[in-house]
Amino acid sequence: MHITRSKSLFEKAKNFIPGGVNSPVRAFRAVGGDPIFIKKADGAFIYDEDDNEFIELINSWGPMILGHNHPMIKEAVIKAMENGTSFGAPTAREIEIAELITNMVPSVEKIRMVNSGTEATMSAIRVARGFTGKDKFIKMEGHYHGHGDSFLISAGSGAITMGAPDSPGVTKGTAKDTLLAPYNDLQAIENLVAANKNEIAAIILEPVPGNMGLVLPKERYLEGLRKICDREGIVLIFDEVMTGFRLAKGGAQELFGVTPDMTTLGKIIGGGLPVGAYGGKKEIMEHVSPAGPVYQAGTLSGNPIAMAAGLTMLQYLNSHPETYLELNQIGSKLITGISNSLSKLGLKYTINHIGSMYSLFFTDKEVFDFTSAKNSDTSLFGKYFQAMLKRGIYLAPSQFESLFLSIALTDDLIAKIIQANEESLKEIL
Ligand code: PMP
């Protein structure tokens, strides 16, 4: 595999862009080697600047649930472009997408569009604070909610990959209102609630976290959080930026039957364009400006191109529920193949899997929270990543990310991934 052009682009990029990339994990620091620069993507494939072809399991970190460059999304974008790219004024399509999301996501009665997942979570916390009149909130260790100051404390995703789960630049004043709990531990929540009686505005979490690698909620954990929040008057926020419209039409909250008070969304609702959103119960959302006093705004929010792409994507998912069956089948086939290879090779590595998301952890111990995720041998993961890349499979360049599957993965491609996985494991061990 030649990556001559990617190498020289990276060298040049470092002169003008910090670390050569616009988002840290892209720099391949955790897996070694130089990042590949992408020229185009189509279906299940991406192509780099050196014209290498890869089957890809990142899917833009989630949104490409139908595969890359889907003709339907492309057409919607081109059509919308013909009428101009931004107005900074309300449009009919914003109502259409808002109404559709309220129909699809159980907790969402009203919704506000923003431009990224980061904005969605920052705004949701502000609204929860404004609604309850309380300052503190609980966040789970290893969960990632974007790069808002109050979330960069024991954060997952790129923050842990770069070894900086607590970022410099976040003031002590901000950090003191973020209370930390291990995921999947209801007693830890009870202890925090007791020690901060009537001071906690919200509990925010990824219901199925994908930012410390993929981790699943233990039985009755989400229900337990719901009960505590009801009892204590705490706003329960599910960050479904990754899981929304992916695990089910109504996200993890539909799948697990637990309805939060607020939900943050992103990725899929933009069909690959920059969008985020936060929504929830009417009584809470009525606190958002101009209906209420909690200020939140955005010049490009509800951008007509992004709305066209997102609406097309959501309309498709809403009218094709079989997509989720298909995604689950693709996930099952792949995981069965990978598990068979592990048994054949006598390896006991942990695979966490749900629907179209999975992580292979380089540890034989159960992974159920941040501490157990860190048992994984990350240097071995780096070798595995490179071995897979060499075989034409592009994985997320960090152990602490989930992989995302799309319906563009055919049986042939799944077989190729399984074979590459087996060969890669053999090579590195
Ligand atoms: N929340 C979750 C659960 C995420 O996975 C991410 C990003 N991967 C974010 C928030 C932040 O979204 P963005 O990168 O669009 O700001």
Image (tube, helix red, strand yellow):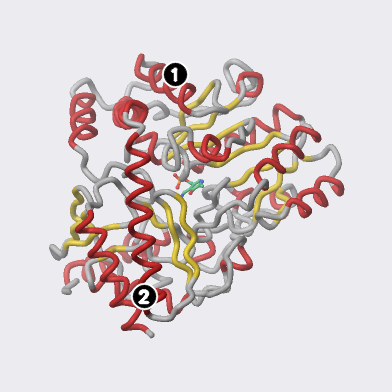
Looking at the image, which is closer to me, 27 or 419?
419
Quick one: SS at disc 2? Answer: helix
- For label 1, being within 8 Å of ligand 1 is answered no
Residue ID for mark 1: 99
The correct choice, above or below, for 101 with respect to 411 in the image is above
CA–CA distance between discs 1 and 2?
A: 44 Å
**Dot 1: few (<14), some (14–19), or many (≥20) neighbours within 10 Å?**
some
Left or right of 303? Residue 210 is: right
Residue ID for mark 2: 384
Residue 263 x/y as whole percent: 56, 34
Residue at 23% x, 30% y is: 77
**How many numbered tags mark residues here?**
2
Amino acid type at image mark 1: Glu
Left or right of 239? Residue 139 is: right
Residue 164 x/y as whole percent: 56, 65
Left or right of 104? Residue 129 is: right
The correct choice, above or below, for 46 with respect to 230 in the image is below
